[in-house]
Amino acid sequence: MEKKAKVELVVISGRSGSGKTVALHALEDLGFYCIDNLPIAFLNQLIPLAKESYPKIAVSIDVRNIPLQDDYNELNDVYIKATHDPEINSTVIFIDADYQVLIKRYSETRRLHPLSLHNLSLNEAIKKETEVLKTIASVADLRIDTTNLSIHQLCQQVITCIQGKPFKKIVMIFESFGYKDGITKDADFIFDARFLPNPFWDKSIREYCGLDQPIKDFFSKYPEVENYINKIDDLLNGILKPIEQSDRSYLTVAIGCTGGYHRSVYIAQALADRFKSRNVCVKVRHRTLIKKQKV
């Protein structure tokens, strides 16, 4: 049986202005521990540390981290060590863009090229950078040309390379709240459950919350409750894939009722359970219940 690698290591490099930082952020959203502008000298030291504490790690290496007179022996040694280590699954991604596009991007942002600090013009700096990075470019497992890519398209290409599909799994957050405490401000969708039958008026079950069986039994008597859950479910399920493809990291769905204790809790939990059963990454927050527990 083949031994599974302990560490997933991604090295991102490329010419300045090509989109390395965007790519690194995409990996951060996939759960990678990310280090921007890591000096090559530290990469060799990072590998044993990653085996102990960081199973998913991504580093960005650019021209600022490579001495201009470096003979690249250290880089080659690290690359060979990583690619031949059975405990490391390494991927080198080199990101680039057309020369004229890089010129335009620097002109639009008015940022200094890293090599401009060496008294080089922008044209000279880009040409020098191409020479310095040629070794990393030659060993890259994947080259991405961002000349005609949007930020979202670049993220999709990086994510596809790492996990084999063009978008990362979105995290769905289902939150219950009471209107008496105010509407959830960070929600993407808010659904009102105040029109549904209210268990509060049944004194025998009033003290139970929407997670308890007596409340579940109460709602099972009213088909409009199940119909409402089905409608919300259909809506969210129908738009989930396009939302994932738009490079969103999470989606917050809030369900509100008067007190935030019965109807909203029951519906939020029911929806969360449905999406969890479909292998969607789900988190649940019951605002009123949390407040009561803290009191």
Image (tube, rainbow, N blue to C red):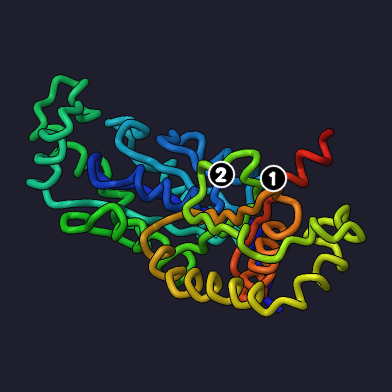
**Could you tell me residue 197's position as x and y percent?**
70, 65
In the rendering, which numbered label is found on residue 287? 1
Q: Is residue 87 something one can see in this rendering?
A: no
| Label 2 environment density (alpha carbons within 10 Å; few <14, some 14–19, many ≥20) | many
Quick one: label 2 or label 1, which is nearer the N terminus? 2
62 in relation to 110, above or below: below
Left/right of residue 66 with respect to residue 283 in the rendered view: left
Of residue 166 and residue 58, the one placed in the foreground of this image is 166
Q: Amino acid at mark 1?
A: Arg
**Could you tell me residue 237's position as x and y percent?**
50, 73
Q: Quadrant of the N terminus?
A: bottom right
Local SS, label 2: loop
Left/right of residue 119 with respect to residue 72 in the rendered view: left
Left/right of residue 67 with respect to residue 179 in the rendered view: left
Dividing the picture into quarters, in which one does residue 153 lie?
Answer: bottom left
In the rendering, which numbered label is found on residue 58? none
Of residue 33 and residue 229, the one placed in the foreground of this image is 229
Which residue is disc 2 drawn over?
184
- Which residue does the image show at 79% across and 56% down from the upper left? 200
C-alpha span from label 2 to label 1:
9 Å
Outermost residue, right side? 204
| Label 1 environment density (alpha carbons within 10 Å; few <14, some 14–19, many ≥20) | some
Of residue 35 and residue 214, the one placed in the foreground of this image is 214
Q: Is residue 64 something one can see in this rendering?
A: yes
**Could you tell me residue 87's position as x and y percent?**
63, 60
- Which residue does the image show at 43% across and 55% down from the upper left? 248
Local SS, label 1: helix
Q: Amino acid at mark 2?
A: Thr
Do residues under tags 2 and 1 come within 8 Å of each other at their CB atoms? Answer: yes
